[in-house]
Amino acid sequence: MKKKAVVNDTQVCQIRMQAISDTMSILSGKWKFHIIGTLIEGSKLGFMDLLREVDGIGTKMLSKELQDLEMNHLISRTVMDTKPITVQYSITKYGETLAPIIDEMAKWGVAYRQSVYKL
Amino acid sequence: MKKKAVVNDTQVCQIRMQAISDTMSILSGKWKFHIIGTLIEGSKLGFMDLLREVDGIGTKMLSKELQDLEMNHLISRTVMDTKPITVQYSITKYGETLAPIIDEMAKWGVAYRQSVYKL
DNA sequence: GGAAGTGCTTTCCTCTAGGAAACTATTAGC
DNA sequence: GCTAATAGTTTCCTAGAGGAAAGCACTTCC
């Protein structure tokens, strides 16, 4: 008989692992953290604004990632009735709940840089 | 003249974004969070233990991810002088500093599940 | 009337992350 | 001698992530 997993074999762990997988799949990809981070800083931004703010991203990726995030209710898209049509993207209340994760990651990243510098 | 980015154009933001990128690149991939999470729970584990605990991972991925993590000083590898040679993997003090990030992600994932359930 | 700005979508391409399976090497037990 | 467990490495394959560039629809300025 095959040995069974022990450490992770409690319900709490299973749920935790599942939760982490969920979070990762929602925030997967190279750009979502940057987009969300940018939208948290500057609340209302247009497509072109984001294209300029998020360094290196292209139109296809931005468009796709924005759709993903909107589908998950993390950001909201509002078409404005302006002369050349404009769109405003902003974080939802729900999206703002990601701030603690982003903060922790930023904190850790900064500490990492410092620890590497010291070596 | 091309319009310039505004929101992210402060030093604080640049550093934050860089820090987030660093963190993401170190924790990139499908498995690192699971491996680290597992090692935080059950401090000392062998290769085969991890293979059983981290559900779905294969030998190649596990081997590669462990090397990555060791290179970044997040885990330590100790070869034991036993009859069939065994290896012990465990988190370093430094690796433990990731716990807050993992906790936040787990918390958020759990909340996400609940919010989806309510809709 | 043409350039330039808005907000995308679509096509085409490449690169790599990740999985399956086979293989190495060593030791212990039956 | 065969099986099983230890800890990996190597090879082969593919699905998908992501980039570059072009196209599309609309408007406004000069």
Image (tube, coloured by chain):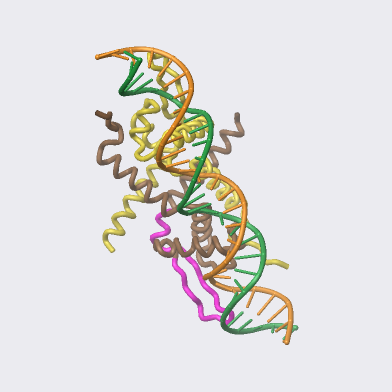
Chain colours: A brown, B yellow, C orange, D green
Residue visible at 31% across and 59% down in the picture: B116
**The magenta segment:** A76-98
Viewer-side residue, C12 vs B10: C12
The spot of residue B31 in percent (x, y) is 43, 40
Residue A62 to residue A109: above or below: below
Task: Say which quadrant the C terminus of chain A sits in.
Answer: top right
Residue visible at 38% across and 47% down in the picture: A21
Viewer-side residue, B33 vs D18: D18
Tell me if C15 is positioned left or right of B37 in this view. right
The spot of residue D25 in percent (x, y) is 56, 81
Residue A8 to residue A61: above or below: above
Q: Is residue B47 magenta?
A: no
Residue visible at 48% across and 65% down in the picture: A90
Q: Is residue A84 magenta?
A: yes
The spot of residue A12 in percent (x, y) is 27, 41
Residue A118 to residue B114: above or below: above
Residue B52 to residue B24: above or below: above
Residue visible at 27% across and 31% down in the picture: A4
Task: Say which quadrant the N terminus of chain A sits in.
Answer: top left
Viewer-side residue, A72 vs D17: D17
The spot of residue D6 in percent (x, y) is 38, 22
Number of dots carrying numbers: 0
Viewer-side residue, D5 vs B23: D5
Q: Is residue B113 visible in this depiction of the protein?
A: yes
